[in-house]
Amino acid sequence: MKERIEARIAKLREELESGKKLLADLDARRAEVERTMLRISGAVQALEELLQQNDGEASAAAAVS
């Protein structure tokens, strides 16, 4: 009986360590995805501002003509 309990404890400890590793991997992946989304968001914002600036210049040029 004691050996079965010790074996079960060992198995549960292995599963716990496996879960901890998986969680750490998921946390790292989440952080990577968040950084990627932040870069994409910044790029979208920069391009939208450039588009607005270009539209403003085109409107000003048309008004001068």
Image (cartoon, rainbow, N blue to C red):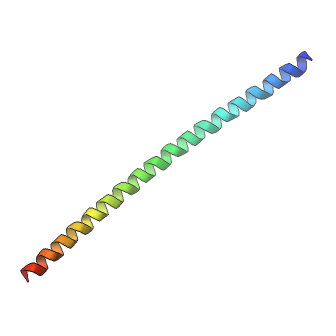
Question: Taking 36 as reference, is 6 left or right?
Answer: right
Residue 61 position in % (x across, y down): 12, 78
Q: Residue furthest right?
A: 1
Q: Residue furthest left?
A: 64
Q: Residue at x 12, y 74 (%)?
A: 60
Residue 40 position in % (x across, y down): 40, 57
Residue 9 position in % (x across, y down): 79, 22
Image quarter of residue 27: top right
Question: Taking 44 as reference, is 62 left or right?
Answer: left
Q: How many marks?
A: 0
Q: Residue at x 7, y 79 (%)?
A: 64
Quadrant of image for the C terminus: bottom left
Residue 58 position in % (x across, y down): 17, 76
In the depicted view, which residue is nearer to us: 62 or 33?
62
Q: Is residue 15 above or below residue 59?
A: above
Q: Residue at x 39, y 53 (%)?
A: 39
Image quarter of residue 14: top right
Q: Is residue 49 above or below residue 23?
A: below
Q: Residue at x 85, y 23 (%)?
A: 7
Quadrant of image for the N terminus: top right
In the depicted view, which residue is nearer to us: 32 or 53?
53
